[in-house]
């Protein structure tokens, strides 16, 4: 399979030396699921966007930028998402990518009054994605790092996971689009470095809770299995 990664940010230089760039993180996890995958990275901030007929699946990364801004590259990305949706191509959105998909398809994204989400977030798992294998668990724990949230889903979206802090944590559109606020690609070390970096803007209680949460296990590989099943189902649908 040929996978296009739409990269929407760069990792801070000091952290990149230890943890790599965002595409590196995704490639590591997805390749662990299927070593035969091939990847091409597009720098969306430079208006690089993949052609929709040249790849089997697409993934939009996180970003420090706001999905509700009017920057030209964000508007271009939204138009690309709308075209991807129209053609029902397999698309996964992570954090900022999750928010961009929601906005492009008629939802709403805002800075949350609840403040920063950091560390490991536990959500109620309402349902596994419709294309995925069934799961018995009823919760989903994923590393997070965000202030912005989806505050209204697109009308056609199906909610998959939720919490009091982040009500629209994970959703799907049809059987071709998967969006999640969390960061399954993050390592615990990288997530802890982000918490430490933001210590000065957090209350002592927020900081301690975020650091303590990092000891909990996460369901990252389950999420990546869902993404891979999404891409495979897209190929099967095209061949049908």
Image (tube, rainbow, N blue to C red):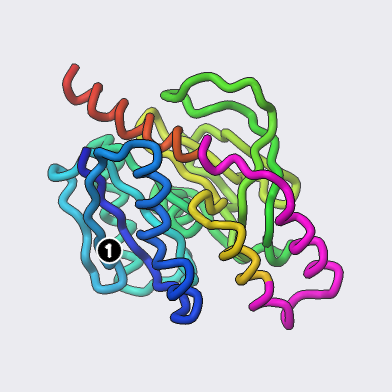
Q: Residue at x 41, y 37 (%)?
A: 227
Q: Tell me: 102 left or right of 231.
A: right
Dominant secondary structure of the magenta stretch? helix
Give the residue number, with chain letter if any, for mark 1. Answer: 76
* Mark 1 crowdedness (10 Å alpha carbons): few <14, some 14-19, many ≥20: some
x then y, percent, for residue 224 = 45, 40
User: Which one is in front, 202 or 218?
Assistant: 218
Q: Residue at x 56, y 65 (%)?
A: 190
User: Which one is in front, 113 or 161?
Assistant: 161
Q: Is residue 86 in view?
A: no
Q: Tell me: 70 left or right of 5.
A: right
> What's the magenta region?
196-222
Q: Is residue 130 in view?
A: yes
Quadrant of image for the C terminus: top left
Q: Residue at x 41, y 62 (%)?
A: 22
User: Which one is in front, 84 or 218?
Assistant: 218
x then y, percent, for residue 67 = 46, 64
């Amino acid at each position: 399979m040929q996978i296009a990664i739409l990269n929407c940010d760069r990792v801070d230089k000091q952290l990149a030396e230890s943890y790599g760039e965002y595409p590196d993180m995704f490639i590591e996890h997805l390749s662990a699921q299927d070593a035969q995958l091939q990847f091409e990275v597009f720098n969306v901030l430079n208006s690089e966007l993949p052609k929709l007929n040249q790849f089997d699946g697409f993934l939009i990364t996180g970003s420090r930028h706001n999905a509700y801004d009017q920057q030209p590259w964000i508007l271009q990305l939204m138009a690309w998402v709308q075209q991807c949706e129209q053609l029902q191509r397999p698309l996964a959105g992570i954090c900022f990518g999750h928010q961009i998909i929601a906005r492009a398809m008629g939802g709403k994204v805002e800075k949350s009054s609840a403040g920063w989400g950091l560390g490991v977030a536990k959500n109620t798992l309402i349902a596994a994605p419709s294309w995925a294998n069934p799961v018995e668990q009823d919760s989903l724990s994923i590393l997070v790092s965000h202030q912005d949230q989806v505050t209204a889903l697109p009308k056609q979206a199906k909610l998959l996971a939720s919490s009091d802090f982040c009500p629209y944590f994970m959703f799907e559109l049809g059987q071709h689009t998967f969006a999640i606020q969390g960061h399954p690609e993050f390592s615990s070390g990288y997530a802890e470095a982000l918490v430490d970096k933001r210590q000065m803007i957090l209350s002592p209680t927020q900081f301690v809770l975020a650091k303590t949460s990092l000891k909990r296990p996460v369901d990252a590989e389950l999420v990546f299995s869902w993404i891979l099943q999404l891409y495979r189902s897209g190929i099967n649908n095209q061949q049908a």
